[in-house]
Amino acid sequence: MTNPAFWNGKRVLVTGHTGFKGSWLSLWLLSMGAEVTGLALDPPTEPSLFALAGLERRMDSRIGDIRDPAAVDAAVRAAEPEILIHMAAQPLVRLSYDEPVETVATNVMGTVHVLEAARRCASLRACVVVTTDKCYENREWPWPYRETEPMGGYDPYSASKGCAELVTSAWRRSFFGKPGAFGKPGSAAIASARAGNVIGGGDWALDRLVPDCMRALMAGRTIPVRNPHAIRPWQHVLEPLGGYLLLAEKLWDDPADHADAWNFGPSDSDARPVSWIASHVVERWGDGAAWELIGGDHPHEATYLRVDSSKARMQLGWEPRLGLADCLDWTVEWFRRYHAGENIERVTLDQIERYQGMAGRTSVQMDGRTP
Ligand SMILES: NC(=O)c1ccc[n+]([C@@H]2O[C@H](COP(=O)([O-])OP(=O)(O)OC[C@H]3O[C@@H](n4cnc5c(N)ncnc54)[C@H](O)[C@@H]3O)[C@@H](O)[C@H]2O)c1
């Protein structure tokens, strides 16, 4: 469970703060009293949670490209972070087929630039590199993947994240040899975090199921669905973010035992077919909403991938708290309130506060409800 008192007054650098997860994380950190600096390109979507929540005014927001080592270095020097959470990336599988070079440049060399700046930064104590469950070599088998399994990736995005993991591991072993000797360059504890597909309010990315649903519903259109039988392990955006925060706290307190790779996946019962998600969202939205199958050739997408989060449960005390049905309901609620013109910073903070107030969940019901 995240400890708000820990974050009060901490200097935190978030890369990718203008994106979906970065905006939620920045708001959460600010609400706990952290001094937050961000480094990213302009928001990747219009509209964006970053703009709607007024984050530019509330944090030290720096627009820069992580493919440029000087830009990364300048942001790290200015922020003098104690904690760095690296999330900037080209995060879309389908776009990675159209822009493979840019995807690899951002996700692999961008990560190298962040790690290079991090190892020169004497103030840094903890660094979390965010990758994805897609970093694993996907054998399309039914068992969940553990942190020890090989990296891989069929498509450019997945391969780039597998590479980012390898690079993080190599830099940790080669250049961050003194965790705990704080105040010296190279003394930070570095971990990586592998979470699955996240959903939540404020995501307008193209070619993602829930944003596609919300766009269609708000425009009064039928939801277009491809791959209705594909099963994905869904989780609310606050679940992995809570994991990253908890991991950073543990890195701070006990660096030697936590500078490693960590899975933050949803519960098994939250792995559902795309058609189930679309039907649930349609039912919750009401107003005669519907979904339809769209045909055509689609690039290869992995059909099944689950991660085993036992290590995070047992060693960090992290576990998912929102069942899938609740997580979809929170998402529909967020977009309904956005559609009604409510203050988005307030809407988002309401959900962060509600999430923080929830007691740890010990089991998941088959209907996807949080007991
Ligand atoms: N959304 C998901 O379902 C999901 C699942 C697993 C992992 N992730 C990972 O979480 C992280 C955040 O994902 P998201 O969904 O918020 O993505 P997003 O597209 O909403 O945000 C990406 C952020 O990275 C920044 N960025 C992109 N290229 C950059 C560059 N060259 N230089 C500087 N900044 C750049 C963007 O400006 C933006 O702030 C990514 O690392 C992604 O791979 C996301």
Image (spheres, rainbow, N blue to C red):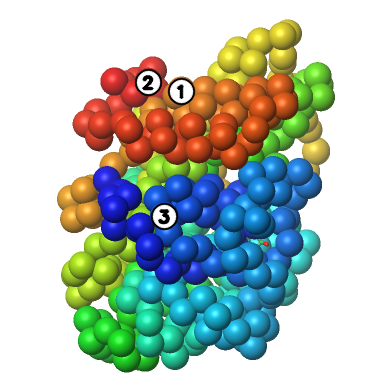
Residue 205 visible in this rendered orientation of the protein: no
Instruction: Return the disc, 2 or 3, that comes first in the chain's sequence.
Output: 3
**Which residue type carries mark 3?**
Gly
Camera-nearest residue between 140 and 77 = 77
Instruction: Kindly indicate the quadrant of the structure image that contains residue 64.
Output: bottom right
Q: Quadrant of the N terminus?
A: top left
**Image quarter where ligand 1 lies:** bottom right
Badge 3 residue CB within 8 Å of ligand 1: no
Q: Position of residue 22 (x, y in %)?
A: 56, 55
Q: Residues within 10 Å of mark 3 (few under 14, many from 20)?
A: some
Q: Which mark is residue 325?
A: 1
Q: Earlier in the sequence, mark 1 or mark 3?
A: 3
Q: Which residue is mark 2?
A: 369
Q: Are marks 2 and 1 in contact (CB under 8 Å)?
A: yes
Residue 33 numbered mark, or none: 3
Disc 2/disc 3 C-alpha distance (Å):
32 Å
Q: Which residue is drawn at the image coordinates 32% and 33% (left, top)?
A: 357
